[in-house]
Amino acid sequence: MSVGLAQGDNLLFDSNVDVDLAGSRNVEAYVSAAFTHSGKMISDVGCVFVDIGPGGLGATRTTAAFANALGFAKTIPVIGIHAFELIGFHVAQSTQKAVVCIRPAARPNYYMALYDQGALSDFSFVDVDAVQSFVRRHQHTASFAGKFSFVEAVGAKEGAWPVPVANSASMTSFLAVALNKYNSGACTTRVYPISENLVVNEL
């Protein structure tokens, strides 16, 4: 879990560099620290951006609920950002390649998508065979992000499985994706976390 506070494209606070917050699951503590360290107040907030997953279900639901409550209380936009947009953008900045994003879901399933040139495609909730096939199809042309590992088949002709570059995005990357969403007019008043019990729509 992490929280950032920005004014325009200027990042004022990044909880990832606050050692006092390390390991905390208290969203309110993160937000309070953001205001304390930046000299801003809740009345200064004009929009809330939140990672809606897929990811850790407890943290995703908690932060989405907090964002919705803050947006409702202040009558400001709440914009949900797909986790694969965040890690895809973050990894693409350094590798200059399309990015296959994968995270585990309820066993034995996975979420997967392809991030390429600023857009997500092939977002799916799939079993291990489907995700392995997807990885093999892109392993020579894409970078990989998220969290996955597969057992090597003895004598596999395809070679070793690729290793994910990252499973999270920097707050700078989060801000860049968030501002792009905001400037494109993708404003909402409520967001919903992505979870296995919700229908996964093709992007």
Image (cartoon, rainbow, N blue to C red):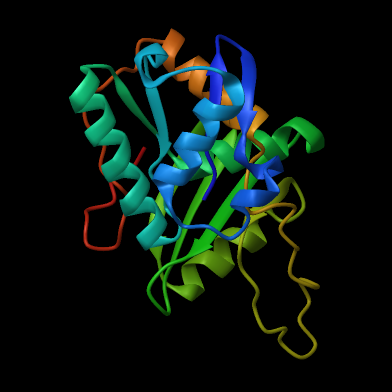
Q: Taking 116 as reference, is 124 left or right? A: left
Q: Kindly tell me whether residue 118 is visible in this rendering.
A: no
At x 50%, y 74%, the residue is 129
Q: Position of residue 107 (x, y in %)?
A: 41, 79
Q: Quadrant of residue 93?
A: top right
Q: Taking 130 as reference, is 197 left or right? A: left
Q: Position of residue 120 (x, y in %)?
A: 49, 36
Q: Quadrant of residue 184?
A: top left
Q: Position of residue 1 (x, y in %)?
A: 52, 50
At x 73%, y 48%, the residue is 143
* 128 shown above or below 13: below
Q: Considering depth in this image, is 137 or 182 the residue closer to the camera? A: 182
At x 38%, y 21%, the residue is 42
Q: Position of residue 61 (x, y in %)?
A: 31, 53
Figure label count = 0
Q: Considering depth in this image, is 41 or 54 the residue closer to the camera? A: 41
Q: Considering depth in this image, is 3 or 144 the residue closer to the camera? A: 3
Q: Kindly tell me whether residue 14 is visible in this rendering.
A: yes
* 3 shown above or below 198: above
Quadrant location of the C terminus in the rendered image:
top left
* 41 shown above or below 126: above
Q: Quadrant of residue 173?
A: top right
